[in-house]
Image: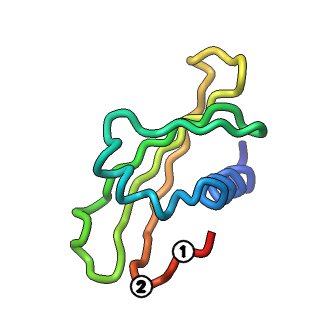
């Protein structure tokens, strides 16, 4: 998947699953297991989130490192591809997803 494809993937993941709202919870409560979603277009997507800095350190925003491992349906586990991105969520902006 090229850069444009990755951008579309992240956009779809964040919009459909309202992921931005879940990042603090995923970074603190699901640190070992992550969460898995099924997408017809991509297959099985396993998301792991970690806080890039301590939550609440910055009064304006929180930062996260998000990793998504994508495994096409029927593919072997070794064929899974992992993508990573850095996300900054501003606290004062409401989420409209």
Give the residue drawn at x 57%, y 18%.
77
Q: In the picture, which quadrant includes the N terminus?
A: top right
Q: Mark 2 points at which residue?
A: 92
Q: Mark 1 points at which residue?
A: 95
Quadrant in which residue 54 is drawn: bottom left
Answer above or below: position of 19 versus 73: below
Residue 5 at x, y percent in the picture: 74, 50
Give the residue drawn at x 60%, y 26%.
80
Answer above or below: position of 85 versus 90: above
Residue 31 at x, y percent in the picture: 32, 41
Q: Distance between the residues labelled 2 and 1?
A: 10 Å
> Please, what secondary structure does the residue beneath circle 1 have?
loop
9 left or right of 31? right
Give the residue drawn at x 42%, y 85%.
92
2 left or right of 44? right
> Please, what secondary structure does the residue beneath circle 2 have?
loop
Quadrant in which residue 42 is drawn: top right
Q: Which of 91 and 66 is in front in this view?
A: 91
Q: Residues within 10 Å of mark 2 (few under 14, many from 20)?
A: few
Answer above or below: position of 44 versus 18: above
Residue 16 at x, y percent in the picture: 66, 56
């Amino acid at each position: 998947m090229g850069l444009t494809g990755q951008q579309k993937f992240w956009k779809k993941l964040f919009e459909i699953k309202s992921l931005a709202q879940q990042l603090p919870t995923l970074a603190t409560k699901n640190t070992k297991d992550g969460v898995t979603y099924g997408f017809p277009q991509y297959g099985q997507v396993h998301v792991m989130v970690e806080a890039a800095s301590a939550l609440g350190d910055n009064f304006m925003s929180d930062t996260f490192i998000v990793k998504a491992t994508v495994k096409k349906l029927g593919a072997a586990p070794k064929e899974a591809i992992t993508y990573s991105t850095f996300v900054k969520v501003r606290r004062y902006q409401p989420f409209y997803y």
